[in-house]
Amino acid sequence: MTITLRQVPTQTSIPTVGRLPAASVLQSNLAESLLNKTGSDTMKSQVTQPMKTITVFCGSRSGVHDDYLNDALRVTEALVRQRITLVYGGGNIGLMGAIANRAIELGGKVIGVIPEILFEKELAHHELTELHQVSHMLERKNKLTELADGFIVLPGGIGTLDELSEEMALNHIGYQNKPIALLNTRNYYHHLMTFLTHTSSEGFMSAQLLDQLIIDSHPETLVDKMIQKSLPDQH
């Protein structure tokens, strides 16, 4: 079921939140080559590109450091500047609610997908461009995948990790070929990348699958890399 909730106003100029200090230097060399796949922080974005929607996976909590929220908002601002529709889990709390609110404030399009159990608990965001109410969590994940041209993974908990794992698996088996990017605020995904690198070195994961992940600690650069990955001359 799809509920259309509002008309999208014309976009205006978009202010950005202040730049935060760079993340600390990584201590482990094992995952450093993956975690440092960063381009220039002043990389120029192109507005004309084939990527129209990005599903953002993130926490229903905001974390203990302001950096998580600030960087999530910067990702949202970058998406709206590029006229990319934000697709997310449809909630009104934590990082989920914050990115939806920011996109709405800036006149962006926001599509939410939420299961009935969370809708009934009044956790749904009711100011979205569209809200898809689905029967269960598996259907929610399928819809979030279906609507996306690519995926950005912000800091989050077990649900976010589940969503990341599923999209990587779908790419691996050939069900889809969509870019996946991790925002590494405060080196949040450092230990995960160390584990995944170990998984690959032990022969349980393709190194190619791991290398396909886009990883950056700068929100604007991360979005730029997603767009460049989707351009025809990047394949």
Image (cartoon, rainbow, N blue to C red):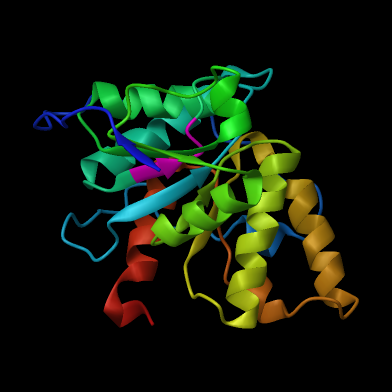
Q: Is residue 24 visible?
A: no
- The residue at the point 47 percent across, 42 percent down is 218
Residue nearest the viewer, comparing 19 with 94: 94
Up the image or down, 48 lies above or below 219; here it is: below
- Residue 125 at x, y percent in the picture: 43, 23
Count of numbered labels shown in the rendering: 0
Up the image or down, 137 lies above or below 100; here it is: below
- Residue 216 at x, y percent in the picture: 53, 50
Relative to 64, 72 lies left or right:
left
Up the image or down, 132 lies above or below 73; here it is: below
Q: Is residue 199 visible?
A: yes
The magenta segment is 86-90
- The residue at the point 70 percent across, 41 percent down is 159
- Residue 90 at x, y percent in the picture: 47, 33
- The residue at the point 64 percent across, 45 percent down is 137
Magenta segment: does it hold 6? Answer: no
> Quarter-wise, where is residue 86 in the image?
top left
Magenta segment: does it hold 87? Answer: yes
Relative to 76, 33 lies left or right:
right
